[in-house]
Each structure stands twice: as structure tokens, then as C-alpha cells.
Image (cartoon, grey):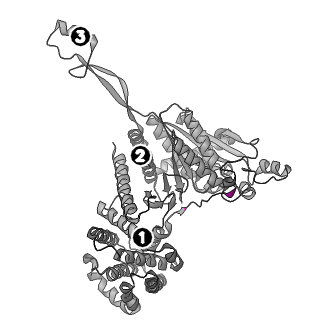
Amino acid sequence: MTEAQRRVRQEEQVAELCAGVVRAFSGEADLHFRGQRLHRGRTPLPWFAPHLHPSPDTDDFASFRGAADGLALRLTASDADLHARLRPEEPVARMVFEMLEQFRVEALAPQDLPGMQRNLRHRHEQWSLGFHHAGMTDSARGLLLYAVAQICRARVNGQQVVEETEDMLEATRFALSPLIGHALAALRRARFDQAAYAVHALSIAHTVAGMLHAAHDEAEDAHDDADSDNKRSVFSLVADMDQEIIERFTTAVSGRSAVLDDADGAYRIFTEAYDREHAAASLVRRDLLAELRDKLDRRVAAQGVNVARLARTLRALLAEPARDGWDGGQEEGHIDGRRLAQLVASPTERRLFRTERQEPAADCVLSFLIDCSGSMKEHAESVAMLVDVMARALEQAGVASEILGFTTGAWNGGRAQRAWRRAGKPAHPGRLNERCHIVFKDADTPWRRARPAIAALLKADLFREGLDGEAVDWACARLLARTEERRLLLVISDGSPMDSATNLANDAHYLDHHLKDVVARREQAGGVAIAGVGVGLDLSPYYSRSHVLDLAASTGNTIFREITELIAGQHRR
């Protein structure tokens, strides 16, 4: 097992153990972690508070157990509807309010569970020290936010602040006392009454938010270079924490379609007369394709990815031991009948055995299915670089690969919608556009021959609208026609399925409901392991295994590491 596989397995085991703790304490059987996010069924739960999300790279198991205990208390001791009604909209105030509510439920940890109380304190201490050691308390604004978190938790829980940073809090504590002292004193008394507690928590949240914004404006007016030179300003910190509480990446909006429900899930297509499947190279002029390929080559070179090392990693992840003949002349193993005559001629001869030789072989095919809808235009170059390098590395690893795309032949329905109008606009016609599936590289074509066609991903006018469910069905059917034992499909998308003509003629969730049905059916049938790769979007409402890529912020090597880790864990839910 490679290091990447061991890391993924360990993270999954920790997630399963923590999910078991949350389920046991809360009594909710459908809670589980997916992508380090707690879900109820297929619905992701809020992030709640920043210290509830330890990192596998920097935190110990006790931190994960403390986070699990904190989540369990939040689910059992906090009224989510009441909290949502009271929560402020302004991001900084909302962040502080979320933390204060989490401190309240942690103060309610049962006295007969001292282990839970130790876990909660350990997790908060680890988060606090990580916050401090990262240089986030170097500015006055960062120190203010840190002091509020420390002082409020200590007051609500009746515990001491973190000893290592206690001395540096004194001046800030003194300055805060006249501003939030009354509300702070009332927090512990009201901890058993969520509504009463929220009154004081809101007062603190709004006061702190006002102080932080005022300090931010003053620093900008004074051009506070020293503060801006800190590793991270408080407002970058607030953004990071807020993206954990509110969400760093938007989750795909999904719902049920009344039209599909009324039809017992029977997805309809008004007409297939205009549906097409194209080889990518046939859609772009040869001279333009050469220009696009040159542009893509420059982008790949700029990433500095070690393709050989990536190929070795992929081979280790995807290869399985396979029989590769026999080694004769061994001193132990299976008796080799062809050498028994030597025993008669030389009774002391011991090399009469043979052993089975096994070599790793990657009996696997991996398909990339790329959303070529209009919103993906801005990501086209990054996605093209990703799949081009992956296809090259997979080939070196002995793994077959496909690169497929899906879009529509027209905007707003095209000829299919015009045919529907001519037919008198019958109700609920189903899909109303020209389906367009594109093959950039098939599994039997070597990467070198497919290089020009892959560059067609950079042609902007190929990107129109997206019929994701039909595309996943198509890609799975292609994989199932292959002879490889293991088949993987990675769907790369930045949004929910969208075709305006179809949605207007049916309902808003017709296509995304169909996508969920297709993925669920294919996952249940087996044969193809499916994962969603969200480009700045959480695709977990559609795919049981998914990962969000931040193409704008991540380096090339980081992107490939994240993809290989997704592949490494592909065989487990």
C-alpha cells in the first residue's frame, strides 16, 4: 500500500469512527462524513464553528474525537430552527454568534462523561494554539478576535483560557470589559435557555463585528503597512473561518421534480433526431487546433508537474498483483514435475520447486467526463491541463483513459424546441434540446495521437448548456463495454445540470433530479465507480463520493495530489 493509500484509508477510518460517535450520541442513524463534512443522508449539515474541523495533516486523533463530540452536542442541545431565525446576516457577527452557540452546547456536556469534556477542551486548545502559532494574533484585529473566542468560552464553560496565551490577552480583556462585560456575565447564567442566551450572544457578536470593521477601516486609512505585512490579516482570517461556517464553496442546489415524481421517475426526451456524438477534432479547424495545442503545451510546461512520478503514484494506486508465469529452480514452493528426473540423477538436488511469479498490472480504465456548459469556459484551460497531464501519466502507468465532454447543440432548445412548438407545445415534453456528446480521447487511442483533439477543450464556442444525467449514462455505458476489471468515472463540473428550454417546459429540478436518479442507479448496479469533481462547487448532492477543486488557488501539484487521493479512496464510500 502506498503512502497516499495509507493516508486516505486512515482518514476514512477516523471519519467512520467519528461518525459512529455522533450517531450513537444523537440517535440519528443517517449521519455520516463525506469529504470531511457531516451529512444527514445526502444533505450536508452546516459547518457550525471553525474549531470543529480539524485537519488530517496537523491534528491528532483526540482533536477529531473532540470535534465529533462537539458536533453531537450541537445536534442534540441546539434548536437549529431557532438558531437560524436568530442568526445575524453580517458575516463577522454571524461567525461570532456561531462560535458562542457552540460554546453553549459544549458547556452542557454531561457531567458523567468526563472523557467528552476532556475531548472538547483538547480540541479547542489545539485549534487555539494553531490559530496563535500561525501568526494570526500578531495584529490588533486578530488578537481581538482571538481574545473574544478565549474569554467567552472560558466564561461559558467555567474553564481557564489557554495557558500559553493567557498573558497576551490581558490588555485586550481589559479593553473589552466595559463593552461586553454585562452580556458576557449573563452568558453562563443563560446557557440552559437558548433563546435567552442568544440575546446576549447577539449583543456580543454585533459589538465585536463593529470593533473589527472600525479597526479595519482605520488601518486602511492609515495605510498600516506593518499590519498588512502579517502572515494573514484578520479579515483574511474571518474569510477563512466564515467559509468554514457559511461555506467556502457553494453546494450545488438540488431538489425533486414534481414532473418526474408524477411520472414515477420516467425521464422523457421529446426528440432524439438532432442528438449528435462528435470526435472533438472534427469540430475545430486544423490550424486553430494547432494554435490551441501550442497554448495548452505552454500551460502544462508552466505547471512543472513531474509526470513520471505521477505515473508511478497512479500505477501504485490502480495496479493489482497478477499472475505472470513461473520461476523455476527454487528451493521451495510447488514441486516442478519437469525437474524430478534431476532428483534421481542427483539425490541431493534441492532446486526442484517452482514459485508463481506475480507482477502488478493495472487492469483498469478511467474516464474523465467534462461539463462543457457555458459557465465552464473560464475553467477550460485549467481543466484541459489537468486531463491532458492525467491522460499522459495514466498511459505511462498502463491504465487506459478516456476524455469525454457533454454540452448541447444549441442554446435555448434549438431545433428540438422548435419541433415541440410545431407539435403544439404538449405539456411536460421532457428534455428539449439537442444533445451533444464529444469524444476528446477514447480509451484505445494513445495520448500522443489524441494530443491535438484534447486541445479542442479550449474552443470557447463548444460550451453551451448541460444535460448531466444523460452524459453520465453515456459515459458509464462506454466503460461497461470495456473488458477491464476496474472502471472509474470522474465527472468534472462547476454547476448543476442546466438547460433553459427543458426547465421552462417541465420544472426547475427536472434535470438535476434525473442526474441524481442516474448516479444512484449506476452506483447501485456497480460495475463503474463514479466520483464528482466540483470546480469551486460541492457536488455531494449528486455524487456519494465527491471533491471540490479550487483551480484558482491551487498549484498544479496540489491539484494532482487531490485527484490521486480521490482515486485512492474511490473503492470506499
Q: Give 38 or 396, whichever is nearer the viewer.
A: 38
Q: Give 312 or 117, whichever is nearer the viewer.
A: 117
According to the picture, the residue beneath numbered tag 1 turns out to be: 76
Instruction: Verify CB contact (< 8 Å) between mark 2 and mark 1.
Output: no
According to the picture, the residue beneath numbered tag 3 turns out to be: 340
Distance between the alpha carbons at the discs numbered 3 and 2: 46 Å
Nearer to us: label 3 or label 1: 1
At horizontal 48% and vertical 65% (from top left) the residue drawn is 45
Q: With respect to residue 395, does 427 lie above or below?
A: below
According to the picture, the residue beneath numbered tag 2 turns out to be: 568
- What's the amino acid at mark 2? Ala
Residue 184, quarter of picture: bottom left
Report the magenta residues as a range.
Answer: 251-258
Nearer to us: label 2 or label 1: 1
Q: With respect to residue 319, does 336 lie above or below?
A: above
> How many numbered callouts?
3
